[in-house]
Image (cartoon, rainbow, N blue to C red):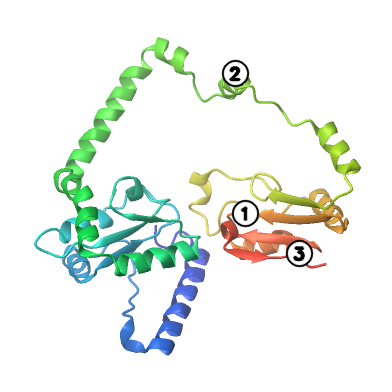
Amino acid sequence: IPGARRVDEADTLREVRSLVVRIRNEFGPEVIDYEEQVGSVLPIDQRLAIWTSSRVMMHTPIREGLNLCPLEYVFARKEPADPGVVIASEFSAVSSILNGALRVNPYDIQMCVTSIDSALSMSQSERDARQGRDIDFVSTCPSGLWTRNVLRDLNDATLSKSTSSRMDVVGDSSPDSILAREAELGLERLDLLALEHAYKTSKTKRVIIIDFNGTLVVKEPAGKYLKREILGSSGFKPSHVTTLALARLCSDPLNTVYVVSGDSQQNLERAVGNVPGLGLAASNGTCFADPCK
């Protein structure tokens, strides 16, 4: 949703504009056409003009629902047009729909670079084969059919809810049901006394990796923080006691301590960047800082 996370959008725009400037300075202004679109939808004629003139479509959201633009791209480049190649984020819904797409992790820069090179240098036969995996589905499954299927599933869910026997078999998502299923799987709680004993008696070097959201700070539900200007932790910082514990762990010469998070670099540095000797890995490892004593 445009404008929902202004700080994140501003950071992303700044990075993209910087990349465009570097590319143009290195290879000339004619090698890249750059335009910023305000809003979430382009008119259909403008979208078709872009799809038909592009050999590759790169679609790399971090999180979203079903975006139909990659499906439009596949359809717009069916015969007699030259098939295009879709590069889709593994976090997007279309990555599980388009079997012919190249799937990437947007956080893995090397994977993205390799996929772009593969798409641009792909042989005609492979491009045809990849399009063939998707064109029948895209051509025969319009949005109206998708809407009818959703309504059918909702109706089926309503009917099944009225039968208590099925709920008794499957179970629900209440805490009691979850704990019961965990017990059946034989899951055991961490033995804190055994962990403390092992830590105190070990004389070799230790690597300690600690998650940030949900461990050092309270993690919010996804539906809540998607509408905020910052991610996951909403700017929360660890408690004073937790910060002291981190500092104590980092002060031990046998320890190498890292805090990892999917949060942004700015949020993670604001929260725990002042702890001496603490290593940081933000944005799921995209931004990395070794411990500094």
Within 10 Å of the Cα at label 3, are there few (<14), some (14-19), or many (20+) other Cα atoms?
some
Q: Are marks 3 and 1 in contact (CB under 8 Å)?
A: no
Is residue 248 shown to the viewer in this render?
yes
Task: Kindly identify the amino acid type of the residue bearing the numbered disc 3.
Answer: Pro
Q: Is residue 94 left or right of residue 223?
A: left
- Point 62% across, 60% down: residue: 282
Q: Amino acid at mark 1?
A: Ser
Residue located 64% across and 22% down the image: 186
Cβ–Cβ under 8 Å for marks 3 and 2: no
Instruction: Say what secondary structure mark 1 lies in.
Output: loop
Q: Pointer 2: what residue?
A: 184
State how far apart marks 3 and 1 are (Cα). Answer: 16 Å
Going 60% across and 65% down the picture, which residue do you hit? Answer: 287
- Which numbered dot is residue 291? 3
| Circle nearer the viewer, 2 or 1 | 2
Residue 200 position by quadrant: top right
Compared across the picture, whether 268 is left or right of 30 comes to: right
The kind of secondary structure element at disc 3 is: loop
Residue at disc 2, secondary structure: helix
- Looking at marks 3 and 2 on the same chain, the residue that comes earlier in the sequence is marked by 2
Per the image, the residue denoted by label 1 is 261
Of badges 3 and 1, the one in the foreground is: 3
Which residue extends farthest top? 165
Amino acid beneath label 2: Glu
Q: Quadrant of the C terminus?
A: bottom right
Question: Residue 38 in the image: x percent, y percent?
Answer: 34, 69
Label 1: how many residues lie within 10 Å, few (<14), some (14-19) or many (20+)?
many
Give the image location of residue 31, x and y in percent: 32, 83
Q: Earlier in the sequence, mark 2 or mark 1?
A: 2
> Nearer the N terminus, badge 3 or badge 1?
1
The answer to whether residue 26 is above or below residue 101 is: below
